[in-house]
């Protein structure tokens, strides 16, 4: 530990702590603009200068390592004069006319820093040069007039996302933020994650949907989790007048550390589907508005006589977007109280069936947490397509590539990762590739085995996969020589292929990670809601859809149901063909617990109030149970713990 003094206050911090971090730990404020806690220290803006006893000049506290017996002063006349000079220079460099900026009024770090120093104006005339505004991007705008060249966005794009789209061209007064080689932002290599917008200290990068809607102090901020995929990224939802203004990543969230993808940050704000706000009952061939009592009674009257019947009874499905509390109640109502033959999820175990099967066979967890991706020195992805799905997991891999992490890609098509891979095996034959890698490890002497058999197996695997033997050897060489390899596989791999992959992971001491579809898919699997679904003479079907967008396949499968009840947030083909429709909350209106892909239990919080007449998924299931003289007492925590988790959260 290091002992130093800051403004007369004794401070003790671990080795490697900067002076700025030490001051922050002691509750001493030092202004800064280029620094961000999620980024490496940069020392560019010079606003955080402090006096250090024994040093002739002022020192940037963000890059200055704290040392034992160091004496630091943060508020001397010399320091204050330097700060004001720095701020004057920054304000005069571009056209920072605060009344016209969308982040004025408390959200701009530049403005706040000036106000903290008592500045009401700056002493030097503005540049008056007209800097361009790039509005070509779908989700945000780049206004060079507001840019202070702090490099935060550039560093975030590289350090946190690994995309390296942004950079600075020219030097000195001609320096300019650019995308790629100077192309418009909308046609650049940007992946629209919005991390650059999240770290921008001024109004240089602004979101299209949330701009000019007032400062953050006038909004309600709710910490919750993203409902896009099974990652469960931590988010902060900014709302005003019961509508979402913006979504940002929670920098303290253990899953994502503040990073989001476009599907979590921007896409939810573009929801255009029509809400279901009142119960509907089919009368004379048409859906008509009804009271909750009538709708529930109609559903119960048709479902009650079918209780306990099998082939001609009830088939029930629930969306893995529902909280664990609702899934447990759904299972008890239809699997227990009504004895339905089919009680499953809309995913039907496609994303978890294999991992559950193999884990149960082995009697132990077979997968690791996301930390394995952050620390891996070699990553093998097998059909995972992390550039489209579960993108934040892909960011964990991409940002480590410049530090030497090797990437072996097994995909059936070219994607964003293809150009970044050390070895790209373009094939969809994942099982054959695994066979080839096992044989190649023997051929390279990295695993023991019969050389002749390995040679034959290697040739056969290469032919079956449509790749070359040399590529398989190159991939095996990277995987076999890695100290911390990690395998990421697609969500719908079958059990025989997964058994092979588990064997390969064991031989190479690799961590296994799989993506698992919708937010609560692992919870649904833990509760046994992972069976295949098919109507086979069933007289009724019940679908707890929530706000999931139903697939055409699901709509087609339910089209022949003689009686269909759908509890849903939005209208769809399924609500149009239903006999009873029960309106429920969408993701931002609901609360409850979710089990993410690495087995982490997290709580979603309500950030919006549902429209009048709309109920929670759990409340609807409880009300339906009451109509059938049943009481739901399911313990969601006990349901999750009833089966060993296939994931060992490290």
Image (cartoon, rainbow, N blue to C red):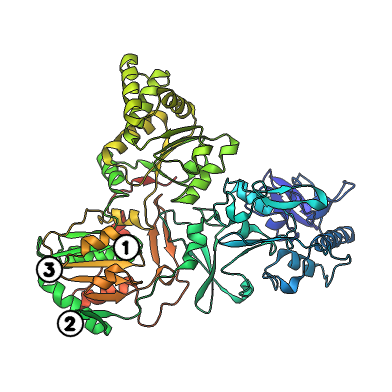
Q: Secondary structure at mark 2?
A: loop
The mark nearer the N terminus, 2 or 3, is: 2
Q: Position of residue 154 (x, y in %)?
A: 66, 50
- Residue 634 versus residue 253 in the image, above or below: below
Q: Position of residue 247 (x, y in %)?
A: 53, 65
The mark nearer the N terminus, 2 or 1, is: 2
The mark nearer the N terminus, 1 or 3, is: 3
**In this orientation, does residue 19 appear?**
yes
Quadrant (top left/top right/bottom left/bottom right) for the C terminus: top left
> Which residue in the structure is indicated by mark 3?
307
> Which residue in the structure is indicated by mark 1?
550
> Which residue in the structure is indicated by mark 2?
284
Q: Secondary structure at mark 1?
A: loop
Q: Secondary structure at mark 3?
A: loop
For label 2, the crowd category at 10 Å Cα-Cα, with few meaning under 14, some 14 to 19 and many 20 or more, is few
Q: Which mark is residue 490?
A: none
Picture quadrant where residue 145 is located: bottom right
Left or right? Give the position of 218 relative to 265: right
Badge 2 vs badge 1, beta-carbon distance below 8 Å: no
């Amino acid at each position: 530990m290091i002992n130093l003094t800051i403004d007369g206050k004794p401070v003790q911090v671990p080795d490697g702590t900067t002076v700025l971090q030490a001051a922050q730990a002691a509750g001493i404020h030092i202004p800064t603009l280029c620094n961000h806690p999620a980024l490496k220290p940069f020392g560019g803006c010079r606003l955080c200068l402090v006096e250090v006893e024994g040093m002739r000049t002022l020192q940037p506290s963000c890059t200055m390592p704290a040392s034992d017996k160091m004496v630091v002063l943060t508020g001397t006349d010399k320091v204050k004069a330097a700060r004001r000079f720095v701020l004057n220079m920054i304000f005069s460099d571009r056209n920072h006319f605060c009344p016209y900026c969308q982040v004025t009024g408390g959200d701009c770090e530049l403005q706040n820093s000036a106000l903290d120093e008592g500045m009401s104006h700056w002493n030097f005339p503005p540049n008056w040069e007209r800097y361009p505004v790039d509005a070509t991007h779908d989700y945000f705008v780049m206004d060079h007039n507001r840019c202070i060249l702090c490099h935060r966005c550039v560093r975030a794009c590289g350090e946190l996302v690994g995309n390296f789209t942004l950079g600075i061209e020219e030097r000195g007064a001609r320096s300019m933020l650019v995308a790629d080689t100077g192309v418009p932002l909308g046609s650049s290599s940007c992946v629209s994650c919005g991390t650059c917008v999240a770290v921008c200290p001024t109004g240089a990068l602004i979101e299209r949907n949330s701009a000019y809607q007032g400062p953050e102090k006038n909004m309600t901020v709710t910490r919750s989790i993203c409902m896009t995929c099974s990652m469960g990224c931590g988010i902060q939802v900014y709302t005003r007048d019961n509508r979402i203004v913006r979504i940002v990543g929670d920098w303290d969230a253990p899953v994502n550390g503040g990073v989001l993808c476009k599907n979590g940050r921007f896409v939810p704000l573009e929801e255009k589907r029509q809400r279901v706000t009142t119960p509907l009952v089919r009368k004379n061939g048409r859906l008509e508005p009804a009271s909750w009592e009538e709708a529930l009674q109609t559903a119960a009257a048709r479902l009650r006589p079918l209780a306990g019947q099998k082939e001609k009874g009830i088939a029930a499905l629930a969306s893995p977007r529902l909280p664990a509390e609702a899934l447990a109640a759904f299972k008890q109502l239809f699997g227990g109280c009504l004895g339905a033959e089919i009680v499953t999820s809309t995913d039907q175990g496609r994303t978890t069936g294999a991992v559950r099967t193999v884990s149960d066979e082995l009697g132990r967890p077979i997968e690791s947490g996301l930390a394995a991706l952050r620390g891996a020195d070699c990553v093998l992805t097998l059909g995972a397509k992390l550039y489209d799905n579960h993108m934040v997991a892909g960011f964990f891999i991409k940002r480590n590539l410049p530090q030497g992490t090797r990437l072996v890609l097994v995909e059936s098509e070219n994607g964003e990762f293809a150009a970044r891979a050390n070895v790209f095996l373009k094939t969809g034959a994942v099982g054959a590739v695994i066979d080839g890698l096992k044989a190649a490890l023997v051929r390279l002497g990295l695993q023991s085995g019969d050389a002749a058999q390995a040679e034959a197996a290697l040739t056969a695997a290469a032919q079956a996969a449509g790749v070359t033997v040399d590529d398989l050897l190159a991939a095996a060489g990277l995987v076999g020589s890695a100290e911390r390899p990690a395998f990421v596989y697609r969500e719908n791999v079958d059990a025989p292929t997964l058994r092979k992959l588990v064997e390969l992971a064991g031989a190479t001491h690799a961590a296994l990670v799989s993506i698992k579809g919708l937010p609560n898919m692992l919870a649904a699997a833990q509760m046994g809601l992972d069976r295949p679904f098919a109507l086979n003479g069933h007289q009724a079907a019940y679908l707890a859809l929530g706000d999931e967008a139903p697939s055409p396949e699901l709509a087609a499968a339910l089209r022949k149901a003689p009686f269909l009840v759908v509890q849903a947030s939005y209208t769809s083909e399924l609500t149009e063909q239903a006999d009873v429709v029960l309106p429920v909350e969408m993701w931002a209106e609901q609360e409850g617990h979710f089990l993410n892909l690495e087995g982490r239990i997290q709580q979603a919080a309500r950030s919006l109030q549902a429209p009048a007449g709309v109920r929670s998924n759990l409340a609807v299931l409880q009300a339906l149970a009451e109509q059938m003289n049943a009481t739901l007492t399911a313990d969601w925590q006990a349901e999750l713990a009833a089966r060993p988790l296939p994931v060992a959260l490290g």
